[in-house]
Amino acid sequence: MSSSQLQPVLDRIDADFDNSLERLFALLRIKSISADPAFAGDCKAAADHLAGIIAALGFAADVKPTAGHPAIVARNNGNGGHGARPHVLFYGHYDVQPVDPLELWHRPPFEPAVADHADGRKIIVARGAEDDKGQLMTFVEACRAWKTVTGSLPLDVTIVIEGEEEIGSKNFVPFLEANKKDLKADFALVCDTSMWDRDTPAITTSLRGLVYDEVRIKAANRDLHSGIFGGGAQNPIRVLTRILGSLHDDDGRIAIPGFYDGVEDLPPDILERWRNLNLTPQSFLAPIGLSIPAGEKGRLLIEQVSSRPTCDINGIVGGYTGEGSKTVIPAQASAKVSFRLVEGQDPAKIRNAFREYVTARLPGDCKAEFTDHSNAPAIALDWNMRPLAAAQRALTDEWGTEAVLIGSGASIPIVADFKKTLGLDTLLVGFGLDDDNIHSPNEKYDLRSFHKGIRSWARILGALAEGPAKTDGYAGQARV
Amino acid sequence: MSSSQLQPVLDRIDADFDNSLERLFALLRIKSISADPAFAGDCKAAADHLAGIIAALGFAADVKPTAGHPAIVARNNGNGGHGARPHVLFYGHYDVQPVDPLELWHRPPFEPAVADHADGRKIIVARGAEDDKGQLMTFVEACRAWKTVTGSLPLDVTIVIEGEEEIGSKNFVPFLEANKKDLKADFALVCDTSMWDRDTPAITTSLRGLVYDEVRIKAANRDLHSGIFGGGAQNPIRVLTRILGSLHDDDGRIAIPGFYDGVEDLPPDILERWRNLNLTPQSFLAPIGLSIPAGEKGRLLIEQVSSRPTCDINGIVGGYTGEGSKTVIPAQASAKVSFRLVEGQDPAKIRNAFREYVTARLPGDCKAEFTDHSNAPAIALDWNMRPLAAAQRALTDEWGTEAVLIGSGASIPIVADFKKTLGLDTLLVGFGLDDDNIHSPNEKYDLRSFHKGIRSWARILGALAEGPAKTDGYAGQARV
């Protein structure tokens, strides 16, 4: 392939965009909610549908069972795998978050449509529009354009798509281990991250880790009437709020002993670069109706949301939650608590410290039960990873604005697993925006993100193919 | 009437007991859940059904509309109301608590049955079996026996039954006011309380008040992804747990400023009598799986549950509460919080103090909304109320154990309204037991409570008829 092939590929993407959109819509219509067993059939349907799309591009695509929802492995080794050209492993996930509270959606979450955003942007609205169906389809459609125009892909591509990312990928890691030899590549590509802002593309070079635990406090052997037992019997909601309410101190720091062990401040030069990015409450918080950074006192907002560890209570429930009133003291109450981790923190140690913190504060007659939902370390990618400069150049060409290298507050645990299980570094490129409402009602993906996302991957595939395959030809980049 | 008539009435109750039970079952089958608008039709059906039962006894019974669920007023002035004999106003409620969590019921809550308790007792199992359908039917069936055997009731009786007791009786107080002249009587009878223990009948002479408030904390204008916003955005669950978790101090006292204003310690002689009742954790808490009194340090368990004010969080909900995990920061979180009040506390002042306590602790970007669900003062009944001795004598005769006068930790706000609106003192007699699971799954009423409850009321009606009607003939009793 040569760079002269790129322009026809980009032209083809523009000409075929309506069809690309219709193919995305077909995928968005499938209710592949991985968290709810009621949708297991939909998850299987999404896997089958997507494998069919990829097979039609000339990949050898298989839907493979896991201990949970199935995964797709699709291989396209145009040169017979003789190794003369780079080989990338693209990863995405077809599963989506639950849709509750359903009443806050402006339209049914699985009936995708193009709508007008308040500021005039065209947006694709549906559960999964961004995370991750829209994002993964940017890559698939880029492959389609290359294939249509040139008859082949410019480098070897294996695609692996899982169905349990939103529920912690517990069955995907053993799957990686079991399918190691089919997943060999030079490095991995993931499209599940965001741009810096609407005009500035970004490559994510660090990710926070995640510990997600559920705690259930139990006291009496049944629900009690507060008129009879109020004042005499332990109330699990009171115990739970008392313990969770003490997790943060008055300065917004997490009060669990040892929580910050191993956490280092940013190097002064990086901090200075971040300060210059000028992430303001006005730009970041005002669109969600807030004005005051709520994290640790004395930290920049950008630190609070990307380089500092955090704790959030993601859900809580106990007692009577219906309409009106009921004078009940419930037998139990529970909460889902997650920690975003940074480099230097050991997930297992943090989880144990949280559990010890809760257990040490239990009054007599109460016990706590815990469920581990997720357990992934933070990731700092290799700044000298070979494909970084090629991708940065391709993104800059597409968007007309220098692509930045950023740290993300989110967690993509699979990146650590690729390194550990397959020995692969990962290049994280994505076209999400902060206002995409992922994991929320009215999830959307900018139509421009989808269109220029496809074009971006087409350019990146070309750039990666041009770069040296097995030698260190790319320049290292400083993190901003 | 003479006391010679009593034995045939009691015999009739025994002979007709299977039919009494079947009539209770018919009422228990009606799903009269007042809190849920979906059951409004069932509430109306329960009122119609019950009015029919009472009318069949010769009462002039009407189902009357209120601003909410209807009420029943039924009058039986056997002597043409010429005033020579006492006139009682009996109060009960046909509405029941919601049934959730439904999965914890051993059988459908609205399919009543007689079952065997673990210790061999026969029990009636259904929502409302005790509270208050079973209890109110003890009075109705006692009236039936008197009517069947003697052709009339031994005193004038008006029955008023409402359908919104479990949701705060908001529409019943204006109803009382509007129907004042039809509700004239010498004093009120209420059957919605408990025995001291399985063998010891009790008359309740004090009741705690109730303030029940709902608080909703709001922050961002939508649910957020904790990967993007975690650490930077306020989390309403964190704010709510922090505030609610501080409501009690380390000694179990309520930390709201001014909460204990006006609350007095028990007089030493009363405290001594209560100490002698020897309410132990073994007898009171062990059956519900607990062992340690959870209330204020330095107080007897019996004080904690009946003479001290308390605070309980009755429900809490926010964020993702389904299966598995979701990394959401919710836009809002809410809790239902109730306070049991004692004499000397002003409900309006307590409610305002709670709201100020919450509001003063809100961080920037958060707001709190409140909903008032209930607002009733504590009641201390008149120890010298005339019918007290007659009722105590009748109960002692029926159960073979001296009836005790007790304070109750529960709230029956209507008792204050009877005094205020109708000028009536109330005699509170009931046959509930601490293990009846009222407001909980598997509510039950001992078959013996139902049977001897009917016999008790038959005796009380006779004893009240024998006592002097309009003069002070009953001896005052010291509270125990």
Image: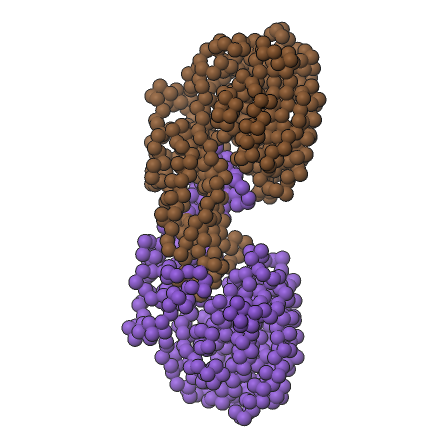
Chain colours: A brown, B purple
Image quadrant for the N terminus of chain B? bottom right
Relative to residue A8, is residue B436 depicted above or below? below
Relative to residue A369, is residue A445 depicted above or below? above
Q: Find residue A356 and report its horizontal and vertical position in percent.
A: 38, 44
Q: Tell me if residue B114 can be seen.
A: yes
Q: Find residue A251 and report its horizontal and vertical position in percent.
A: 34, 38
Judging depth in this view, the residue of A392 and B90 nearest the camera is A392
How many discs appear? Answer: 0
Q: Quadrant of residue A351?
A: top left
Judging depth in this view, the residue of A427 and A83 nearest the camera is A83
- Residue at x-position 33% and y-position 74%: B276
- Left or right placement of residue B61 versus residue A414 in this view: right
- Residue at x-position 65% and y-position 70%: B26
- Residue at x-position 52% and y-position 23%: A422
Judging depth in this view, the residue of A447 and A222 nearest the camera is A222
- Residue at x-position 35% and y-position 19%: A269
Judging depth in this view, the residue of B459 and A302 nearest the camera is B459
Q: Find residue A147 and report its horizontal and vertical position in percent.
A: 67, 15
Image quadrant for the C terminus of chain B? bottom left
Q: Find residue B78 and report its horizontal and vertical position in percent.
A: 59, 86
- Left or right placement of residue A359 versus residue A449 in this view: left
Q: Tell me if residue A107 can be seen.
A: no
Relative to residue B364, is residue A91 depicted above or below? above
Q: Quadrant of residue A67?
A: top right
- Left or right placement of residue B291 versus residue A460 in this view: left
